[in-house]
Amino acid sequence: MNALNPMEIATASAAGDRPSASYAPVLAWDAERGPVPGFELADWLADAAVDALIDEATLTPKPGLVDLRGNGAHDDLNWMLMCHSARALRPAFHAMALAGGAIADPRTLRERIGAAGRDAERAMMHATAGVNTHRGAIWALGLIVTAAAQDPAARSAQAVAGRAGALARLHDRHAPALTGNKGALACLRHGVGGARSQAQRDFPHVIELALPMLRQSRRRGDSEDAARLNALLAVMARLDDTCLLARGGRAALEAAQQGAQCVLDAGGAGGVEGAAALHALGEDLVALRVSPGGAADLLAAALLLDGIENDNMEEVETHHGTTAV
Ligand SMILES: CC(C)(COP(=O)(O)OP(=O)(O)OC[C@H]1O[C@@H](n2cnc3c(N)ncnc32)[C@H](O[C@H]2O[C@H](COP(=O)(O)OP(=O)(O)OP(=O)(O)O)[C@@H](O)[C@H]2O)[C@@H]1O)[C@@H](O)C(=O)NCCC(=O)NCCS
Ligand SMILES: Nc1ncnc2[nH]cnc12
């Protein structure tokens, strides 16, 4: 078989209008040199990103969002669809991670993952028959897997988020100036930064709110689910979530922010009072027909960064003949 270098693989993976089945994992092997550099790391990162999305969808009970109980405030989403969408995104995350390890020039890398991100959105729409399940997550987790692969040795959440932010701040000549999507329009109407600004500011709600809350809750003995719910609530309480703004305006955003803070003030999702407040918040958001989709994406980003920082990524083979990073 003809060998491709990693740059060519990343190009092939990101190219064109095709859904995700077009990605070609068989290119992992170079006939002369053996495993392609970075391929296994990209595998690890792509799996970790999909796991983070499925963990987020499965976490229960989340206010207004799809979870194991049901569809929350959504008519067109359900748990199976969220999981199917997450799996359909794996090839795109893999391509982005490969590109992160292979392309040294930041501008070239930015445009390469921009193309992969747009391809991922098409893969999502193909997998869901046109339902927007994960647009914000593709953006956030795509930047994170790329940034993690750029320098696997420097993999603290802050370092990875910082590199992801640097990529997000670079101009992509091929990106449309205004997508016309609901979140982008909500940003203009309400004067907020949305998903784009969150990434460009190095994910402050993930680094300063979600991860500290996740770790503090674990330390005090909350269950893992309660710790993750508290992390979601910490983001919700402060985020200008364009999903809430687009569907319910300022009133919905304020209801969600204040409700999330009430649950935390009542001791969080792991206690009796907090659980009751969380239930009431969920009922309020469903009655308003709104949900914090942006905060859900940032919880997935936090879970991914937490895994990258703490799990066994260093054992993944990233170079010929070496196993340690
Ligand atoms: C830079 C982009 C994010 C540009 O995106 P764009 O402006 O086109 O679209 P937005 O609508 O703004 O999408 C952003 C999504 O991000 C989530 N989000 C919202 N607020 C925030 C926030 N403050 N911080 C972070 N993330 C946020 C949110 O996604 C989630 O909600 C979606 C479901 O919403 P819902 O209301 O149910 O569904 P809709 O169909 O929209 O409405 P209904 O009809 O049902 O009422 C779900 O997708 C969640 O994920 C926002 O939707 C970026 O996309 C971009 O430029 N991409 C180009 C490619 C690229 O460069 N990629 C780089 C490498 S990956
Ligand atoms: N669990 C979820 N429910 C609804 N929208 C979402 N966007 C991201 N995760 C979501």
Image (cartoon, rainbow, N blue to C red):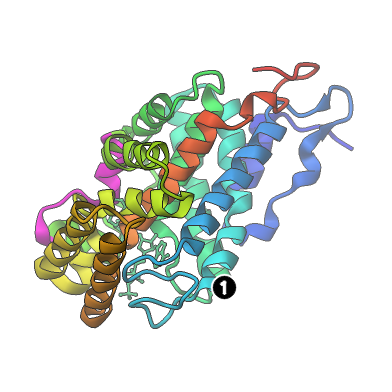
- Apparent side of residue 43 relative to residue 219 in the rendered image (left or right): right
Which residue is painted at 58% across and 51% down in the image? 51
Q: Tag 1: Cα neighbours inside 10 Å, few (<14), some, or many (≥20)?
A: some
Identify the element where label 1 is drawn.
helix
Quarter of the figure with residue 34: top right
Which residue is painted at 26% across and 56% down in the image? 178
- Apparent side of residue 147 relative to residue 319 in the rendered image (left or right): left
- Apparent side of residue 104 relative to residue 275 in the rendered image (left or right): right
Q: Measured from the top left, where is residue 313 in percent x and y?
A: 62, 29
Highlighted magenta segment, given as a residue range? 189-201
Q: Is residue 15 visible?
A: no
Q: Measured from the top left, where is residue 3 in percent x and y?
A: 82, 32
Image quarter hosting the C terminus: top right
Q: How many marks?
A: 1
Image quarter hosting the N terminus: top right
Q: Measured from the top left, where is residue 223 in percent x and y?
A: 46, 50
Please tell me whether residue 259 is drawn above or below residue 74 in the rendered image: above
Q: Amino acid at mark 1?
A: Met
Please tell me whether residue 283 is drawn above or below residue 162 in the rendered image: below
The quadrant of the picture showing ligand 1 is: bottom left
Instruction: Name the residue that disc number 1 marks.
Output: 80
